[in-house]
Image: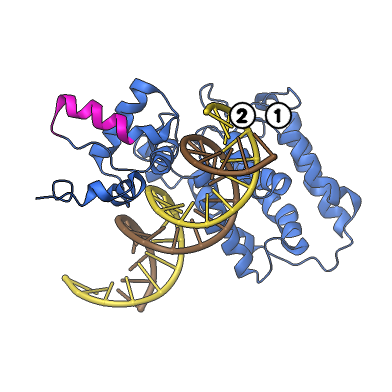
Chain colours: A blue, B yellow, C brown
Amino acid sequence: MDVYESGFISEMTPQSKEDMDVRKGPWTEEEDYMLKTYVNVHGEGSWNSVARLSDMIFLIYSNDIGLKRSGKSCRLRWLNYLRPEVIRGNISLQEQLLILQLHSRWGNRWSKIAQQLPGRTDNEIKNYWRTRVLKQAKQLKCDVNSQEFRDTMRCVWIPRLIERICASSGSPSAQPSTTYEKTSVLPELSSTSSDSQDAQLSSVSDLTDCYNPPSNSNYPNSLQNGWGLWSENLGGTWNIEDGVGFQATEGGESMESVWNEENIWFLRQQLYDDKDDMN
DNA sequence: AACTAAGACAACCGCAGGAGT
DNA sequence: CACTCCTGCGGTTGTCTTAGT
């Protein structure tokens, strides 16, 4: 005899019944399938009704008991994992650059940042930031919100990323490769030890490798403004489908043109100008 | 081979804001 | 206007995997 038959449940409030039934922890394949089926039928949204309706759907076809997940859990699972558009795998150099850039502009607005990286979820970006960037701040023994860390990011990390992007693209005029790799789909990208891949995997640790604290905080204007210049030139959204990887949203300039020879030259020149100004 | 630590990722929790009543 | 419910966001924790010893 289960709790329902015993009459115990009948004295409970609907809310407490729900609490008792709610499953937690990792999702199973069956649960994923149920959720996908639900969304295919009903579309996204109304997450609190997923459990109820999935019960109905599956009781028709089988003895399955349906989803015993909270609406919030269903939403999160769909958005972060099951959605067809979701891309998983290494964060590419270009994406790292964009994340750093957008974070400097918007702070911890993960969902907003994620909107500029189609296929990437706010959760993934947040995890990236916490596991990589915050770790670096910790190693550098400075606060992630400090001016020192921001300067290091702008003067060292960002330029290094750009250098690596240029280097891995093969030629100055080459556009960035679309590195929205999903390891299971594109094994060649995850198994080779190409420069691009090495760069991608090691780029973060380079922050400490080449970290050289600025001797003073009176950076020249061009350096102070340098980040803004990067932002203006790199601002936009990524586009997976066209293979280019980036499309401008604010200025109307496509990433295709942003990554042309002229602009890469400009970015590099900006970098060198900044370095000169510091000396 | 077994154990441990660290890293990466997935999932949960609490809160805030908006919509509906 | 007040209340409730739902959704979305950001912070945090849990779990699994991998690397090192």
> Is residue A94 found left or right of A217 in the rendered image?
left
Residue at image position (32%, 30%) is A36
Q: Secondary structure at mark 2?
A: loop
Kindly report the distance in space between the C-alpha atoms of the residues bearing marks 1 and 2.
9 Å
The disc labelled 1 sits on which kind of residue?
Val
> Is residue C19 found left or right of A112 in the rendered image?
left
Q: Which mark is residue A203?
A: none
Q: Nearer the viewer, mark 1 or mark 2?
A: 2
Furthest-left residue in this view: A1
Residue A182 seen by the camera: no
The disc labelled 2 sits on which kind of residue?
Phe
- Between A145 and A79, which is closer to the camera in this rendering? A79
Tell me whether the residue at label 1 lies in contact with that at label 2, contact meaning CB atoms closer than 8 angstroms. Answer: yes
Q: Which mark is residue A258?
A: 1
Residue A158 in percent (x, y) is at 69, 49
Residue at image position (55%, 50%) is A126
Seen in the picture, residue A168 relative to A134 is either above or below; the reply is above
Residue A124 in percent (x, y) is at 50, 46
Q: Secondary structure at mark 1?
A: helix
Residue bounds of the magenta highlight: A51-63
Residue A29 seen by the camera: yes
Q: Main secondary structure of the magenta part?
A: helix
Question: Which residue position holds label 2?
Answer: A246
Check residue A55 for magenta coloring: yes
Q: Which of pointers 1 and 2 lies earlier in the amino acid sequence? A: 2
